Image (tube, helix red, strand yellow):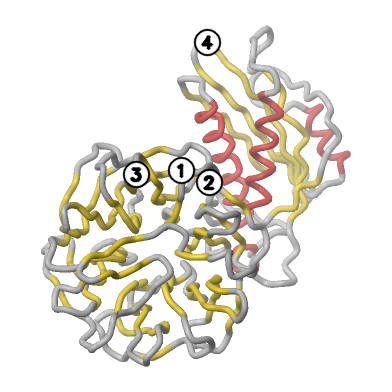
Amino acid sequence: MLHLPRILILTSCVLIGFGLLSKVDSGAADIFLEATRSDFQKIPIGILGFSNGAKRGTNNAPGIAKQVTSILKADLNRSQLFRVVDQADQPVKLQEGLCQGEAMVNRARKSGIPVTTWGRVGREQADLIMDACAFDQGNDTIVRGKRYTGMPITMKLLRQMVHRWADALVSYYTGESGIAQTKITYVSEYKGNREIYVMDYDGHGNQRVTTDGFLNLMPTWTTDQQSLVFTTYQQHDQKIIRLWLASGKRQILVRPKGMNITPTLSPNGKLLAYGSAQEGNTEIYTMNLQTQDVVQLTFHASEDLSPSWSPNGREIAFTSDRGGKPQIYVMGADGSNVRRLTFKGPYNVDPTWSPRGDWIAYVCKAPDQGFKLCRISPDGQEHVQITTGSKKDQDDSPSWSPDGRHLTFSSTRGGRSHIYIINHDGTGLEQLTTGKKHNSSPAWSPR
């Protein structure tokens, strides 16, 4: 039997463990294409501050403006496109209306920083309101001015507004959407069972989306971000289902005929690839979600599972032990032209193709370090170990951010399995989940 860090196959049943706006010309043009280069220069940006109050005389929670600054700073740093330049903590005095007063423009000019941003946050009657502006030294003008309003007034809504502003800045300077509004789904313990959760990309806003009282495992997103597909295990039946987040509606996609695991959607959202042991050993299948037609892709006396689609939908990376030890293979989306991709190391599993198509991340067994994250180019010519650490720090279940600059994964570093994010080059490690519960199998949403 093929052994994966997150999958233990015992006799006839499967137990899943834990542990294991428009673009303009500026000096920042073509950042998206160059942002992964080692010599890429991040854009310096200064946060001049956010004032309390959308109108004179409004009362706001103390420190709310500082919270906005803190959230925005973290978002911009995570983007890997900006370098936040710390500014002196000075009161921001703004005129009523949007934040485009001449005094703030002059202050932005005098800062000498290529890009500056500022704004106000407060309440107007029952609405939360946030105005935000950005000034570009190269254009000598305000290049962005946005007003966000909503209700009820909650910290969740405030965070959403700040995330939207961060993404607006990323979009302006790259022409591509940011990731601050994306989500991560994962599995967590709940009353002795395994349930599916969803949280913001920075670990806030955790929400449980299943209450089944049994094992729910390996969630993945549909391309429209409106539903999740995952394996559910109840009374010896293991099936793959789809759950719509807004309505709670469910659809059984793959019925029990054995073990059904590692589901993943094609880039166009029309095909589901998964591993199934309906014929004895685990093979990889695809299902047309509209017609329910099933096609078997692999035919080998080995364990084939963990499929991952290339961004163009023409190829699938997967795990197989057909060479004796588990390694990463690539085949055509129709099962043709199978080729082995990984040769370094005795144990390589759980591939995930980057959204840009330039890397495939996977779990590798590093000498004297145990299970870590690695990435390899699709032609096999470049290989990089992303995470490092001791053998007790087992890293598992990598999933790319939609911009291809980050990965989320689960790890036992610290004793329990928790969810982390890391830059694709191994920098910027952040722990997203905490507490005494085990959390694992994260999957990053599309934009």
Give the percent coordinates (x, y) of residue 84.
75, 47
The residue that appears at 75% across and 71% down in the rendered structure is 39
- Camera-near label (1 vs 2) is 2
Q: Label 4 amino acid?
A: Gln
1 or 4: tag closer to the N-terminus: 4
Answer whether labels 1 and 2 touch (C-beta < 8 Å): yes
1 or 2: tag closer to the N-terminus: 1
Q: Which mark is residue 199?
A: 1
The residue that appears at 16% across and 78% down in the rendered structure is 280
Secondary structure of residue under mark 2: loop
Give the percent coordinates (x, y) of residue 130.
60, 27
How packed mark 2 is, by other alpha carbons closer than 10 Å (few <14, some 14-19, many 20 or more), is many
4 or 3: tag closer to the N-terminus: 4
In front here: 52 or 4? 4
- Camera-near label (2 vs 4) is 2
Q: Label 1 amino acid?
A: Met
Q: Which mark is residue 433?
A: 2
Q: Residue 301 carries which label?
A: none
3 or 2: tag closer to the N-terminus: 3
Instruction: Give the residue at mark 3.
Output: 192
Q: Label 3 amino acid?
A: Gly
